[in-house]
Image (tube, rainbow, N blue to C red):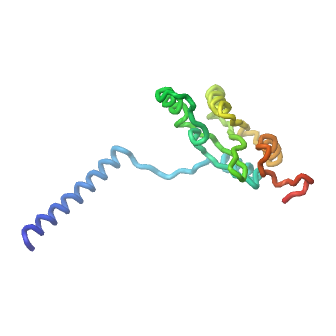
Amino acid sequence: MSSSTSFLLAGLLFAVALAMLAGMLAGQRLGRYAAQKIMTNNETDFFKRLTSANPNGYVFPQVALAALIAPTVRSPKARLIAFRRISQKRVDYAIYTNRLELICVVELDDRTHEASRDAIRDAFLASAGITTVRWESTIKPGVEAIRDQFEQLRPADAFFSYRAADGKTW
């Protein structure tokens, strides 16, 4: 083997060793991660009720608040401050028609919800014309009650309900 080939091979092995060492150090510095469920069992159960109540639409769980609303202030500094207020928050469920028109946001309130913080988030959403519907996690409504609530909130021209005007289902 020529000296240039040996030198090239040694350099390549050195680069691989450095890359492996860097990966190990990054793992120690950044930590390791494990997959987790997107919803608790209670939230999953309620998700099933919501999807049953909205058969021709969509229910999206764990939606980032910044995906639903955006600051409207003109100043870049004020816009950044307003964005930071919402950037780490999410809603439990976003309820949409089959045309992807937002009907409302649903929050399933449990012991982790704090009324004062919830009121601020609800005000952010309300300022964008988005209704927040809250239900207690220990007193979850049935599918019919949820459907009735969605029917009241849906956009006037939305194709939403599975009930026809004559009362027949489809």
Tell whether 53 sits left or right of 20: right
Quarter of the image with the N terminus is bottom left
Residue 42 pos. (x, y %)? 67, 46
Residue at left 74%, top 50%? 49
Residue 15 pos. (x, y %)? 21, 58
- Residue 161 vs 68, above or below: the answer is below
Question: Which of these two is toward me, 94 or 77?
Answer: 77
Farthest residue toward the left? Answer: 3
Question: Which of these two is toward me, 120 or 141?
Answer: 120
Tell whether 145 sits left or right of 108: right
- Say how many tags the image has: 0
Residue 141 showing in the rendered view: no
Instruction: Find residue 125 and report its image quarter.
Output: top right
Residue 9 showing in the rendered view: yes
Residue at left 73%, top 38%? 135
Farthest residue toward the front? Answer: 74
Tell whether 6 sits left or right of 56: left
Instruction: Find residue 110 and report its image quarter.
Output: top right
Question: Which of these two is toward me, 30 or 69?
Answer: 69
Residue at left 75%, top 55%? 56
Residue 65 pos. (x, y %)? 59, 39
- Residue 8 vs 40, above or below: the answer is below
Residue at left 47%, top 51%? 34
Farthest residue toward the right? Answer: 166
Tell whether 33 sits left or right of 68: left
Residue 61 pos. (x, y %)? 63, 47
Quarter of the image with the C terminus is bottom right
Instruction: Find residue 5 and report its image quarter.
Output: bottom left
